[in-house]
Image: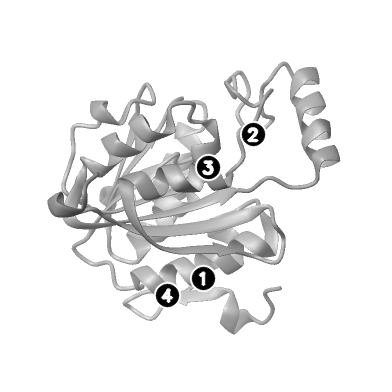
Amino acid sequence: MVGGSELTTILTPEGRSLSLQHFVGWGGPSVVQLMKRTMEILGTELTGRRVLEIGYGHGEMSSFFALLGAHVVAVDTHDVALPGAIAEATRWGVRDRIEFVVYSGDPREIRQADFDIAFSKSVLLLIPQLETFLRAISAKLRPDGQVAFIENGFHNPLAVLGRRIIHLLRRNQANDYPGVAMYNWRLPVYLSPARIDTIRNVFEVREVRRVESPHWYLIHGLKKTANKLP
């Protein structure tokens, strides 16, 4: 469990204290714990670095990376939450460091490249052709680029069944994104050993961390160099 403000805050390069609970949003202490570890790996001095955020949601994580000095390109497949994401970035004074992009879900459409970091939270479970998607992400990274994925793991089968029923009743839509179909939530593909192996096929995975709750994982890796490609 995460406890104490010293474990849930991050300092910007200017010494500003940021609450991980705010920027992580939903997911609870487990995700805060994994995000804390993510920043231990990536570092909190991101000035001059380029971050690709896959799934900007309501803009909290985009703003977080920008507050640490990064230039952020944040992509999502719908514009329902775009006004709120822009408002969040504006509120933190980092709108000029974030480019929000609505795309089809194919990373090849992202015109920018040479990213230092690619980050996602609870996105990969929605990707049916995961290896194809990840290879397209890898192509956008610098040779020494890194990835950090915080993703849902399989948990209690009854909870999974309940979630499927809820999404059926909601017509496969999430309350936070009205009108947006969560396209494969009826049969959710949680992070599994096979899907972790898929990530390993594409990236040089350095760490796979599961929190006490088996519902959340952190996968950190590096772009594979040419001589390490399969």
Which numbered dot is residue 40?
Answer: 4
Which numbered dot is residue 36?
Answer: 1
Identify the residue under disc 3: 194
Residue drawn at x 63%, y 23% is 178
The amino acid beneath tag 3 is Ala
Dot 4 crowding, Cα within 10 Å, few <14, some 14–19, many 20+: few
Marks 4 and 3, how far apart at CA: 27 Å
Q: Secondary structure at mark 3?
A: helix
Mark 3 vs mark 1, foreground winner is 3
Query: What percent of the width, then of the height, locates residue 177?
Result: 60, 29
Query: What percent of the width, then of the height, locates residue 35?
Result: 51, 64
Does label 3 or label 1 sit earlier along the sequence?
1
Report if the CB atoms under discs 4 and 2 are less than 8 Å apart: no
Report if the CB atoms under discs 4 and 1 are less than 8 Å apart: yes
Marks 3 and 2, how far apart at CA: 30 Å
Mark 3 vs mark 2, foreground winner is 3
Marks 3 and 1, how far apart at CA: 26 Å
Identify the residue under disc 2: 176
Q: Secondary structure at mark 2?
A: loop
Report if the CB atoms under discs 1 and 2 are less than 8 Å apart: no
The amino acid beneath tag 4 is Glu
Q: Secondary structure at mark 4?
A: helix
Dot 3 crowding, Cα within 10 Å, few <14, some 14–19, many 20+: few
Mark 4 vs mark 3, foreground winner is 3
Mark 4 vs mark 2, foreground winner is 4
